[in-house]
Amino acid sequence: MIIKSRQRQLAIKGTMKLSDNEISKVDETCFVGICIDSHLTWKSHIQAANKCVRRKVGILFKLRHYVPRYVLILLYKCFIQSHILYGIEVWGSTCKSYLNCILLSQKMAMRAITFSQFRTHSRPLFHTLGVLDVFGLHQLSICTFVFDLSAGNLPHAMIEYCQNIQHVHATRGKGEGLLYLPKCRTSYGQLSISYTGVKMWNSLPKKIREIYSRKTFRVKLTQYILSP
């Protein structure tokens, strides 16, 4: 598989072999449970994850008559949200239109847990249950990544890969806990963690950026995302 933009045309000449076995060209492949396509749209992975989520939302509709709400929330976070969270730091930066299918599945789950009607507005349900939608989960995961990076909790290789987000922007930014936003000329670059991570981090209130406890940081950030 050759990763490239949709606009770029490549002429492939010859074949590639490994131990006399020809390696065929593919447009997408799966690696450690994440589907990677040649244009890095993540559409295939999102569709596969949503298919799994939809099946388990149906189970919630059946179980809600027999177990209390707190059990339904626990089951949601264990068997549905866990699928959404897997690798979301990478594929969650894709087009919002691709993520809408997962958001719709989450809305169905919220209505199932709360016994709400099909057309009930979902945002109050997310807030009442203390559950983040796919966009909120992406923001929480990315900001937690930046928090771990700033605290030195990540492996050395990862820190070297994202070292450009460690540099604060001048004296004023240093006092505010802001990070330097790297310049990205392409849309692919703007979807990278080194860009979106800094952008999301700098948009957080100062009182959240100054938290030193990882657990407290995630709790306060979750409350901030859920706030109206």
Image: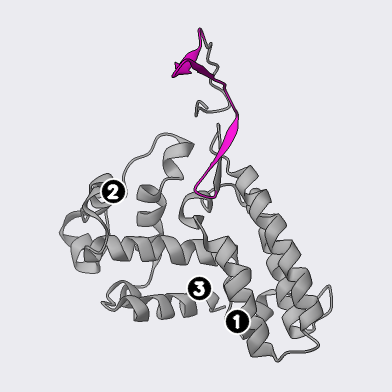
Which amino acid, mark 2?
Answer: Cys
Magenta extent: 13-33
Comparing marks 3 and 2, which lies closer to the viewer?
2
Comparing marks 2 and 1, which lies closer to the viewer?
1
**Residue 85, position as x, y percentages in the image:** 53, 62
Q: Earlier in the sequence, mark 3 or mark 2?
A: 2
Residue sitting farthest toward the bottom = 68
- Front-most of residues 71 and 89: 71
Say which residue label 2 marks: 162
Q: In terms of image quadrants, where is residue 215? A: bottom left
Residue sitting farthest toward the top = 14
Which type of secondary structure does the marked residue at label 2 adopt?
loop
**Residue 41, position as x, y percentages in the image:** 58, 40
Q: Residue at x 31, y 50 (%)?
A: 181
Q: For mark 1, does the 10 Å Cα neighbourhood hold few (<14), some (14 to 19), or many (20 or more) residues? A: few
Which amino acid, mark 3?
Answer: Ile
Relative vertical location of residue 79 with respect to residue 219 in this rendering, above or below: above
Q: Is residue 26 magenta?
A: yes
- The reply, left or right, for residue 19 in relation to residue 50 is left
Say which residue label 3 marks: 225
- The reply, left or right, for residue 203 in relation to residue 122 is left
Q: For mark 2, does the 10 Å Cα neighbourhood hold few (<14), some (14 to 19), or many (20 or more) residues? A: some
Say which residue label 1 marks: 74
Q: Residue at x 50, y 73 (%)?
A: 225
Which amino acid, mark 1?
Answer: Leu
**Residue 42, position as x, y percentages in the image:** 58, 44
- The reply, left or right, for residue 152 in relation to residue 49 is left
Q: Residue at x 57, y 78 (%)?
A: 228
